[in-house]
Image: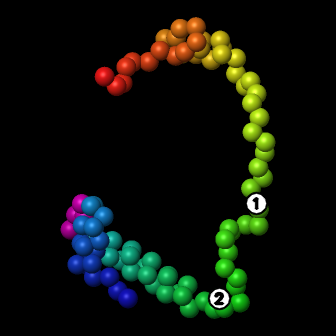
Amino acid sequence: MKVSQEDVKKIAHLARLEMPELKIGEMQHSINKVLVWMEALNSVDTSNVEPLVHMTPALNNFREDESKVTLDRAKALALGPDTNETYFKVPQVIE
């Protein structure tokens, strides 16, 4: 399958990309190279390969959700430009 310059223009339009005329030929060549590569992958025999759910056999190692103090409140508030004794003060966003 070959991609024409009209196909590249249509793809660019659908992707809402502004494609200068000088780049259309270059993009056409790049897309055609990807399609040739995909055709090469399609020729590989995968009949004896089981489908994968994950690329590695590693599973999630969940840990217990435990509360712990990691940063003292006073030290954290000291990092802010404007605070009161409990919170950071920020400009109002919603009127």
Which residue is label 2 attached to? 46
Q: Identify residue type, mark 2.
A: Thr
Which quarter of the picture shows residue 3? bottom left
Secondary structure of the residue carrying tag 2 is: loop
Compared with 18, 94 (above or below) is above
- In front: mark 2 or mark 1? 1
Taken as a whole, is the magenta stretch helix, strand or loop?
loop
Considering the image in quadrants, where does the N terminus appear?
A: bottom left
Task: From the viewer's perspective, tell me whether residue 47 is left or right of residue 87.
Answer: right
Task: From the viewer's perspective, tell me whether residue 56 is left or right of residue 89.
Answer: right
Colouring mode (rainbow / by chain / secondary structure / one colour): rainbow
At which x and y percent is residue 50?
A: 70, 82
Q: Please identify the residue farthest to the top as the structure is shown.
A: 85
Task: From the viewer's perspective, tell me whether residue 56 is left or right of residue 40.
Answer: right
Q: Identify residue type, mark 1.
A: Leu
Decide which of tag 2 and tag 1 comes sooner along the chain: 2
* Disc 2: CA contacts within 10 A as few (<14), some (14-19) or many (>=20): few
Q: Tell me which residue sits at (50%, 82%) in the image.
A: 38
Give the mark count.
Answer: 2
The stretch in magenta equals: 18-22
Compared with 68, 85 (above or below) is above
> Could one spot residue 51 in this view of the protein?
yes
Which residue is label 1 attached to? 59
